Image (spheres, rainbow, N blue to C red):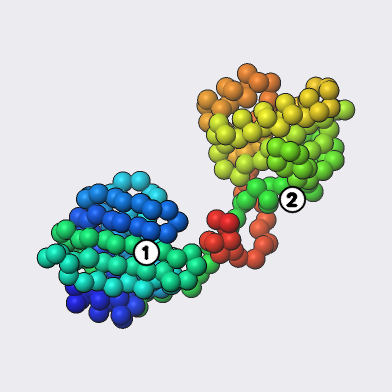
Amino acid sequence: MNRFLADLGDSKAVVLVCRCSIEYWGRSRSVIGSGDRIILFKPDSTLIVHSVSGFKPVNWMSAPTDISAELEEGGVVVFGQRTVKPFEEIKIRVEGVLGYEAYPGLSDTEKLDLTHTEHDMRDYLAAHPSEVDPLFRLKSVEYHTPLGFFDLYGKIAGKFVVVELKSVRAGLPAVLQLKRYRDWLREHLRQDVMGVLMAPGVAANPLALLKKEGLEFRKFNVHKLKISRSRHTLDEWMG
């Protein structure tokens, strides 16, 4: 316990693998029974608890967090308290340590650099509408509807068309979203409407649904995009 507190005091990154139970108060009230967990204590005082499977943490507390540890009923209990809004508390009862490592002097000053986003695709295709279709005539970018925003909206050979863009391989949600947009526009205009999905690729089942619904898929090579935007932080991307 003394080593753990000293490592935190020296702003080291600590990885604790242990069997523990957890109580949490804050965003909600939660209790997690005894189990093997991987706990990360970052130099900025962020605390993240992972299970041994999956990629999402089972709990976390963002900086600034006051972290302490003490003996309680013969075992070590780690406390975390966030005293600024939103207020949070966590109590980790450690039943057995399976692994412990501390890393001093870690540094990462780089920011997340997003490339090949749907916004890049949208801007590129708005400037090069013939790559959607030689007859495509753009009417609007991010056309607002009660269901959301159409990435591109226009006409092909006199027929209205909504274009949904994905910068990665498209799955079923993209097809269902395009169908909802197409159906809403068809009802709104009281005429037939085309729906086009553009992405680097599409999975087999979503492609079958596209064909069944009379929607079209057109492959787009995102590597032709020229990225000129400034760098983004992870928080901006997640927001």
Between 137 and 101, the one lying in front of the other is: 101
At x 85% / y 40%, what residue is drawn? 139
Vertically, is 41 above or below 237?
below
The picture places residue 180, in percent across and down from the top left corner, at 68, 30
Between 74 and 227, the one lying in front of the other is: 74
Image quadrant containing the N terminus: bottom left
Specify whether residue 231 is in view: yes
Residue 123 got which mark? 2
- Crowd band around label 1 with a 10 angstrom C-alpha radius: few (<14), some (14–19), many (20+): some
**Closer to the camera: disc 2 or disc 1?**
1
Asked if residue 195 lies left or right of residue 112, the reply is right
At x 15% / y 59%, what residue is drawn? 96
Vertically, is 129 above or below 80?
above
The picture places residue 11, in percent across and down from the top left corner, at 34, 78
Image quadrant containing the C terminus: bottom right
Asked if residue 151 lies left or right of residue 64, the reply is right
Specify whether residue 98 is in view: no
- Crowd band around label 2 with a 10 angstrom C-alpha radius: few (<14), some (14–19), many (20+): some
At x 38% / y 58%, what residue is drawn? 25
Amino acid beneath label 1: Glu
Amino acid beneath label 2: Asp
Name the image quarter holding residue 196: top right
- Which mark is first along the chain, 1 or 2? 1
Name the image quarter holding residue 45: bottom left
- For the residues labelled 2 and 1, the Cα–Cα distance comes to 45 Å
Residue placed furthest toward the right: 158
Residue 89 got which mark? 1
Asked if residue 139 lies left or right of residue 227, the reply is right
The picture places residue 208, in percent across and down from the top left corner, at 57, 22
Secondary structure category for the residue under label 1:
strand
Secondary structure category for the residue under label 2:
helix
